[in-house]
Image (cartoon, coloured by chain):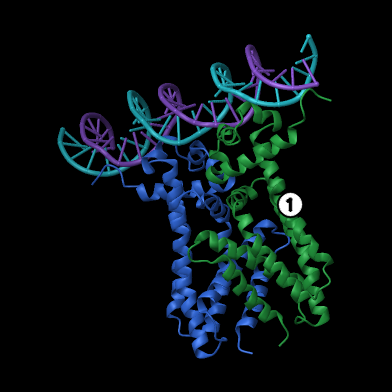
Chain colours: A green, B blue, C cyan, D purple
Amino acid sequence: MSPKPNVSEERKEQITEAATTIFSQKGFDKARMDDIAKEANLSKGTLYLYFKSKDAIIEHLLNRLFEREMADLQLLKEDPRPASEKLTIFTEKIISDIHGWARVIPIMYEFLGRLFRQSVVQKAFKKYLHSYFDLITPLIQEGMDTGEFKAGNAGETAITIGALFEGTILLWVYDPEMIDLEKHLHAGMKLLMDGLKKD
Amino acid sequence: MSPKPNVSEERKEQITEAATTIFSQKGFDKARMDDIAKEANLSKGTLYLYFKSKDAIIEHLLNRLFEREMADLQLLKEDPRPASEKLTIFTEKIISDIHGWARVIPIMYEFLGRLFRQSVVQKAFKKYLHSYFDLITPLIQEGMDTGEFKAGNAGETAITIGALFEGTILLWVYDPEMIDLEKHLHAGMKLLMDGLKKD
DNA sequence: TACACATGACTGACTAGTCAGTTATAAGGA
DNA sequence: TCCTTATAACTGACTAGTCAGTCATGTGTA
């Protein structure tokens, strides 16, 4: 047993939280390690006991970015209800989680700027996209097989749905006063489902 | 007659072009004024003859960002064809312009990271969004009035279409191998139009 | 004492912006 | 045609400031 209890995980979490706040406010490049230290009520030296560099903190944030959300949604896979109902549940789940997301959205878009130059970032976003499709595509396919939805290309439809979600959030970021996230996500999905359902 | 011709506009253009290239490659913060100078075949001092600061160059890029695209699309306003046809033309126009856009997409997303902290950026994106809606909403409304489209909320529908476009581009940025921009923009619009058209 | 944990003053690499000096071009006179 | 002069255009070494990362020095607990 060490002379002090191991606080490593606790500190890492503490630093990660502070970094999220500061990076959201200032962006990755303008944020200083001293800012993060202050926000975390630690000294700069201490940050370096738990992360080897500023980039290491950023990479840690990247890895955590989609984790919780995806884990939650995976549960849908085992849900026994019909496809159209699951799609509704999926929509509701995303919408109800939006407020939790809001905090990390500035960081998401911060990462987008790096997407073109950093393969680590590319990989993370790709992975997120693929796990989203692995979830949604079979669900659409199931609906087409049972006749709930019109026959068509399930993969393409899944992409359209994903685009609608990401796009609505993006427009909301452009102008939060003009876009009511909940309302417009619902309206968009409604319109899409109308096109998807059998005539 | 002055001893030398005025090259001011030409130089500004030259610097803007170089800055676009460098900012795309490195991002706003990592790009150095020396990089831009080198790319433009000028010295750093010369950059400061035409722009008062690095931020001034960035702001100039921001103001040019949506200009050409929006000017082009405004032409649709006076087009006499039926709404659904105009919507198709709109889609085709966007799709055919995508390759021209590709060059500035990294910069667009670079700006997105700043959207949350810089009101100049917020204003520019808001303005773009509003001029998009001023164009599309009346078009949808027209289609609803003539009976081409199902009755509904034209504004909401315009937002859904905009979201679909922006979202598809976003997903394509996530994984250009998975998303075929042309194909999936078409597929998405098709699905949406199916929902939009009268039963 | 021994060890984990914590600190913050310090260093050195980096870069936006400046400015004293240089160069290229056109006009006008011989 | 050649030379002088005016000045717009340009240059790059330099300054002043910033900040990631280091390290010598505590401090509290078993």
Q: Which residue is pictured at 70% across the width and 58% down the height?
A: B175
In this image, B161 relative to A160: left or right? left
- Residue B177, how many percent across, how many down? 73, 59
**Mark 1 Cα within 10 Å, few/some/many (few <14, many 20+)?**
few
In this image, B93 relative to B44: left or right? right
Asked whether the viewer can see residue B82, the reply is no
The vertical placement of B59 against A139, above or below, is above
Q: Which residue is pictured at 64% across the width and 81% down the height?
A: B195
| Amino acid type of the residue tagged 1 in the rendering | Glu
Q: Disc 1: which chain?
A: A
Relative depth, front residue between B100 and B4? B100
The vertical placement of B24 against A156, above or below, is above
Check disc 1 and report its element: helix, strand or loop.
Answer: helix
The vertical placement of A199 against B95, above or below, is below
Q: Which residue is pictured at 64% across the width and 35% down the height?
A: A54
Relative depth, front residue between A84 and B182? A84
- Residue B13, how many percent across, how many down? 43, 50
Q: Which residue is pictured at 40% across the width and 48% down the height?
A: B12
In this image, B4 relative to B134: left or right? left
- Residue A136, how many percent across, how many down? 76, 67
Residue designated by label 1: A67
Asked whether the viewer can see residue A179, the reply is yes
Relative depth, front residue between A177 and D4? A177
In this image, B42 relative to B199: left or right? left
- Residue B152, how many percent across, how many down? 54, 83
Q: Quadrant of the C terminus of chain B?
A: bottom right
Label total for image = 1
